Amino acid sequence: PATVISAGGGDMIENALARLDELIALRPQRYLISIGSNDLRHGNALMQTQYETLVNALLATGASVYHMVFPEVPSKPNAVDMTGFKNWIETTYNSDYIPEVWNNLSTSNVLKPGYDAGDGYHLNQAANNMIYMSIRDHGELPNQHALPVRLISFQAIGKEDGPIALSWITDPAEQADMYVLQRSTDGLSFHDLVTISVNTTGIYGYTDTFRKASKIYYRLRFREKGGAVSFSSIVSCATRTQKREPIQIQPTATGIQVLFEAERKSALTWELFHSTGQLESQGHVNVQPGRNAFSIPLPAMPKTIYFIRIRSNGPTPSLFKILR
């Protein structure tokens, strides 16, 4: 493989060392490591020494080794403060450390609520998506479908409330069979937008009127003369955030139903409080682009007032008062 990502799972560094032969046998061009949180959780005094041993063994194979650290929410049970370990990694490995991962996942060195699976140290799918994009943006993931040099430029330009103008220029002497423009609202899942036939000038353009996201991503898919499929690099264009319908709360026979619109995939947490402030229940919801709905059961208790707090990627939670 080109890249091996070692993210630890439930392992400690000593577990990775015990499987060092397996890691080396893969013989990748690069290793991406994120491990150490469980060592902090269990008070491993040898973690820095063991980490250095692991890294040196991987470097000895001739591969490159890059480092990531994931933030946690130290105020939650079993979560730990990763700041000191992150600082040590950043100082020790400097140019091989990928700061975008930590910076994009954290605020003031604490995991952002929108990336928390609920316990303060496990990450949700939105966080995993952000990790991928952070690594990609840092430039350590190889582009195995890199477009040949015949693509001279590819850009997306938009004006507020206006269409997005896409254009690309190729070497007219070295063109593909066709170009397929693809669009995405999260930079991960792309869908075909339009197929453009090859011309003799190598100059292409398309106007997209889609505005239902705060940022839109584009890439080109094209077929080589020999039949192989490749992709361009990704370009993006920020748009003015569309006004979304507010969260709607509807009573049901057994509880309440929550309805809302979302622009992209993310995670949402909800908490149900008694009027006394006691937490009655809580849960997590995977949010999909478009219309979403989920149910919250209410306890079989006498009529009283409840409060529902809903947290998403935004900094301010939504609070609703419910009379059962």
Image (tube, helix red, strand yellow):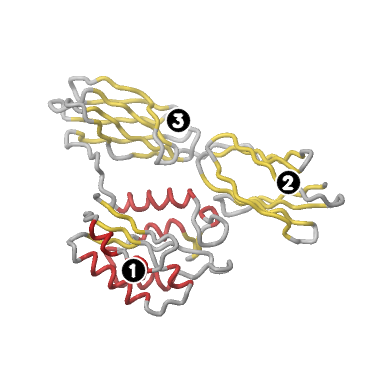
Q: Which mark is residue 162?
A: 3
User: In the structure shown, which secondary structural element does the residue marked by tag 1 occupy?
Assistant: helix
Point out residue 262 in the picture as x, y percentages from the top left corner. 56, 39
Q: Nearer the viewer, residue 64 or 27?
A: 27
Question: Label 3 is placed on what type of residue?
Answer: Gly
Query: Across the whole image, how many numbered discs are drawn on residues?
Result: 3
Q: Position of residue 248 (x, y in %)?
A: 69, 39
Image coords of residue 7 (percent x, y): 38, 59
The answer to whether residue 85 is above or below residue 195 is below
Badge 3, how many Cα within 10 Å: few under 14, some, many 20+? few
Depth check, front residue: 54 or 215:
54
Mark 1 or 2: the one toward you: 2
> Dot 1, crowdedness within 10 Å: few (<14), some or many (≥20)?
some
In-front residue for pair 213/192: 192
Disc 3, disc 2: CB below 8 Å?
A: no
First in sequence: mark 3 vs mark 1: 1
Residue position for label 1: 90
Q: Earlier in the sequence, mark 1 or mark 2?
A: 1
As drawn, which residue projects farthest toward the left? 173
Residue at 22% across, 30% down = 228
The residue sitting at 24% across, 39% down in the picture is 145
State the residue at coordinates (29%, 50%).
Answer: 141
Element carrying mark 3: loop
In the rendered image, which residue does mark 2 sit on? Answer: 297
Q: Residue at x 57, y 54 (%)?
A: 315
